[in-house]
Image (spheres, rainbow, N blue to C red):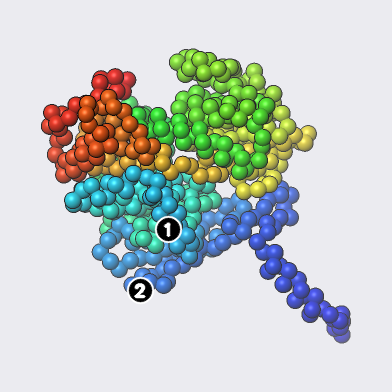
Amino acid sequence: MSVPEPAGGEEKQAKEVEDAEKYSFMATVTKAPKKQIQFADDMQEFTKFPTKTGRRSLSRSISQSSTDSYSSAASYTDSSDDEGSSNFCVKNIKQAEFGRREIEIAEQGTECTECRTSAGEKPLAGAKIVGCTHITAQTAVLIETLCALGAQCRWSACNIYSTQNEVAAALAEAGVAVFAWKGESEDDFWWCIDRCVNVDGWQANMILDDGGDLTHWVYKKYPSVFKKIRGIVEESVTGVHRLYQLSKAGKLCVPAMNVNDSVTKQKFDNLYCCRESILDGLKRTTDVMFGGKQVVVCGYGEVGKGCCAALKALGAIVYVTEIDPICALQACMDGFRVVKLSEVIRQVDVVITCTGNKNVVTREHLDRMKNSCIVCNMGHSNTEIDVTSLRMPELTWERVRSQVDHVIWPDGKRVVLLAEGRLLNLSCSTVPTFVLSITATTQVRTWVGPCTSLGVGMVWKELGTRWDWSLRWHHCQKYHFFWAGVIAGMDPVFWVQQVLGKLLNEWFHGTDPAGLEGSFKLPPDRFEPS
């Protein structure tokens, strides 16, 4: 005999369903021994894209990550002749309109778009570029510029947390084959790279990399494709180091260009971009007040210089660790105390790594840190902090907000780990558009005239300082900058327009611009990079 249901049972059940829908935007805490939080953005499933005629959906099972489970992927095949932009895999294609607005805002602050109209024809026609960079509104401008110049592009993300989902959706909507979403697992990361390279009827002949993962993948898994690559452009310290290792071992059989060490990248992107974005990332994730806080910055390269300057301006007490004697002396001259990490690890409130090396902060350092110490990384790779050593049974991980984990020791001590040791500024915040424009424009120029000699080439050696110098002057117009000493009796803005336009025209058409030397007076030799 069945027990009668209590009166009001249906109303109570309906009320519970209504409350669940009403508060579905809130984070839901799982009941696992280790507390995890799933956010509304993470709960979105991948959606198929069936709205356009002539396209068919291609589903794929996404591997399960530590906190998220995905069931399908957005991918389609276009019936047009453009084979290089035939499919995609993004988080939510419905965000494309929002992403397009983000890209349009970025275009207003960048000079990279000027390259689209500077050439009368498509200088990159026939180029099949496979790229692996951060997928943000700023890099979307670069990608669409390359496509506008005639290239076919397939793109993936170089960081599992830095992708802006709405921007990836906008690129996919525009026809770019993009495979990326925020919060990928390690398996998803490598699948996305492989999906860009391994395509029937389409073979890449150029690589644009950030970190060296794409280059490494093609070299290891597709050696026949790697041998046919006509040029590699690398923009990070980590990736350049890996290229030099291949070159030293005699295994780099294709030309490669070192964009990272160009003046326009080092002195602007690395320094000024990090000087502003480090504070943005820390404030968004921790809400910490820096006045009086003790901070140690590991590494005093261009990134370290930017971080230290920003933290010092807010009243923080900044220490620097550095192994290069020149950089260490620079830190001393800038008013920072150069120390060993082991000397200050017990007293500092924040630890920031930006060396490009591995195991800079080890488990021994983490064990000695004070309670609530914040640990983060501003280098490209996630190997600077030994995060693997923290995934042990005796330690408890607690996700307190997006990209913020508390690692709890048995005695109750907590260490605040940001972005799981990955790049802080692009994982937890955004970066200034204008300063990235300088790097993006340098990369476009590099693609138009890539180096032809084997090994790793330097941008300023291969392209000449004339381009580097003119590029900086072109961006100076944004600040209404005037230097009367450029050319006597000539408006520098007019000079930049005339010279840069002429240089771009000749470079785009594949001619040697050396003949321009007699048409204008170059700046003194002191502008030659050291």
Which numbered disc covers residue 100? 1
Q: Please state the total of marks drawn on the protein image.
A: 2
- Is residue 328 among the parts visible in the rendering? no
Q: Using a 10 Å C-alpha cutoff, classify the residue at mark 1 as few (fewer than 14 neighbours), some (14 to 19) or many (20 or more).
A: many
The first of marks 2 and 1 along the sequence is 2
Q: Nearer the viewer, residue 299 or 34?
A: 299
Which residue is located at x 37 percent, y 40 percent? 478
Left or right: 303, with 64 as reference point: left
Looking at numbered disc 1 in the image, what kind of residue is underneath it? Arg
| Quadrant hosting residue 342 | top right
Secondary-structure class at tag 2: loop
Secondary-structure class at tag 1: helix
Which residue does the numbered mark 2 point to in the structure image?
Answer: 53
Distance between the alpha carbons at the discs numbered 2 and 1: 22 Å
| Coordinates of residue 323 in the picture (x, y in percent) | 50, 18
Tell me if residue 18 comes above or below residue 292 in the rendering: below
* Outermost residue to the front: 489
| Coordinates of residue 333 in the picture (x, y in percent) | 51, 15
